[in-house]
Amino acid sequence: MRTNRQYTIGILADDLTSAADGAGPFVERGLRAVVGRGRLPKEGATIVAVDSGSRSVAATQAAERVAELAAQLASSDILFKTVDSTLRGHVTAELEAAFKASGRKMLVFAPAFPAAGRTTVRGVQLVDGVPVAETAYGRDPVHPARHSRLVDFVTDTVGNVVILDAATQDDLDTQIAALPEPQSILWVGSPGMAVA
């Protein structure tokens, strides 16, 4: 189901914390945001963040929820799919579902969050310099980080993908600002991307 509502920025998250973290940097800039749980909020705002509740369900159900919400947010000027900076959750299933349902031409994947010690070097997600799958996040009993290489999360069906390395917030800011046609991109990242 598509919606006729237009948002400047649509944020799609897998849990409530990520929805709030995704909207937070925009609120700090003086923009108004609303957060919905499981569906788009009835109240309108420039920034709309939606918690799909998908981290706590099976991957197939997560993909279905994300696809439905991504289609509803597809008319947003900017569409931002949050991921945990430690790559926990159903990252692959959700990226593929959001990309297909959004109709965007490119996916930019930048989960680095340098302020929290989470960086990306040569396409590998690191926590304090250690590949994420080799840290405690890789041993999480519920949602472990299964891979450290970002390319391992992107299926062939996604198509045009750009993976950004970032050791600092300035790295993220510079690279994101340089990408043309931001409205044609599905932006995938953590709070570091939202800050950029």
Image (cartoon, rainbow, N blue to C red):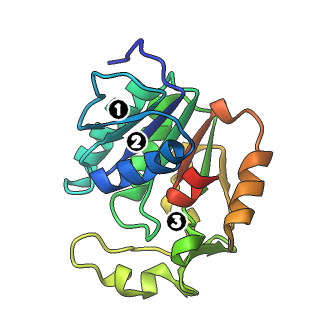
Measured as percent of width and height from the top left, residue 41 is found at 29, 28
Instruction: Give the camera-side residue of 174 and 60.
Output: 174
- Between the C-alphas of marks 3 and 2, the distance is 21 Å
Instruction: Give the camera-side residue of 195 and 186.
Output: 195
- Between the C-alphas of marks 1 and 3, the distance is 24 Å
Identify which residue is drawn at 53% across, 50% down.
188
Mark carried by residue 152: 3
Identify which residue is drawn at 26% across, 49% down.
54
Q: Is residue 152 visible?
A: yes
Measured as percent of width and height from the top left, residue 129 is found at 58, 87
Label 1 element class = helix
In the picture shown, does residue 112 fall above or below 7?
below
Q: Is residue 15 visible?
A: no
Amino acid, disc 2:
Leu
* Mark with earlier residue (1, 3): 1
Identify which residue is drawn at 36% across, 67% down.
88
Measured as percent of width and height from the top left, residue 148 is found at 51, 75
Residue labelled with disc 1: 69
Measured as percent of width and height from the top left, residue 189 is found at 53, 55
Mark carried by residue 12: 2
Decide: marks 3, 2 in contact (CB < 8 A)?
no
